[in-house]
Amino acid sequence: MSTTTDTSSTPAGAATGRPRTGGDGSARGRRPGARDLLASLPWIAPALLLILGVVLFPAIVMFYNSTRDITISGLDNGSVGFDNYVEVFTFAYFWPIFVRTIVWVGVVVGATVVISLGLAQILNKAFPGRRIVRLAVIIPWAASVVMTTLVVYYGLEPYFGIINTFLVDIGLIDTPEGYGWTRNPDTAFAWSIVVAVFVSLPFTTYTILAGLATVPGDVLEAAKMDGAGPARTYWSVVLPQLRGALSVAVLINIINVFNSLPILKVMTGSIPGYDADTIMTMIFKYIQNQHKIDVASALSVVAFLIVIVIVAAYVRIVKPMQEV
């Protein structure tokens, strides 16, 4: 008496433990190997060369210069090890400047995101003239950052600034000549934050608007049918859907704001001392005023590492690539 085995319900390859193959005999789900990397190299080579030329090569040169003794004329007198880093960290104003840089990045990025969330929510609604308003939001982005900062800077001039004149006319300032906002380190730094938020709003707002366009309408309808009010719908349904857009906006803003020089250079550049400086303006002073290319390179390496740590911590905590 013969025994037959029913294999009609057994998937191909399951009994033998062999990987399933496609029609061309290649294994499905296998990890890409060296062959695949070589095959894709012609496509990714331009991007790799761009990264090498724009990021890696300048970073290597910057680190090399940070360990050299470079004169004001550019003459390299040889290696000094990590003496330039010692000078950076033992500089009396370094740690206050470091704290001010963190405050600068945190306040500007935080205020930009909060305001952009409100603007994007408004611009996502249908109302007369919405297209014109959306175009108007782009203006700070289209205009030069230096030009925008100069307009605010001269508007804050005590004697002829239009902003100071307006504040005097409405009674907020009781002196007829206005107030020297850009003469005081604290007020100049505060106005720099205002300008930085203003010029950062267009990109962040439009990034969030793009995220709002991807929120499924049926999900909003389901939340409405479940009795969720506008606030509950926004916090529980809309905001989680904006995770990807917010992650991109925050990450790019952190990098841009940290490396921002023009706004602070214009608004606080005439103030003596280091009471309104961030790391970027300090690097500029090392190069422009003290002509210390080697110490400026060391400080640039420190700034580069700080950005890397901030970005790595942000990605680790937020996990922007994780699905909602």
Image (spheres, rainbow, N blue to C red):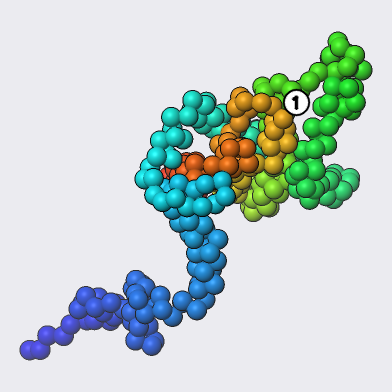
Furthest residue toward right = 169
Furthest residue toward top = 174
Location of mark 1 (residue): 182
Mark 1: amino acid:
Thr
Q: Residue at x 54, y 52 (%)?
A: 74
Q: How many dots with numbers? A: 1
Residue 103 placement, left or right of 188:
left
Can you say which quadrant of the picture contains the N terminus? bottom left
Q: Residue at x 42, y 48 (%)?
A: 67
Residue 141 location in percent, x, y? 75, 48
Furthest residue toward left = 1
Residue 118 placement, left or right of 156:
left
Q: Residue at x 38, y 42 (%)?
A: 82
In this orientation, does residue 156 appear? Answer: yes
Occupied quadrant, residue 114: top right
Q: Residue at x 52, y 26 (%)?
A: 93
- Foreground: 132 or 97? 97
Occupied quadrant, residue 270: top right
Residue 33 placement, left or right of 199:
left
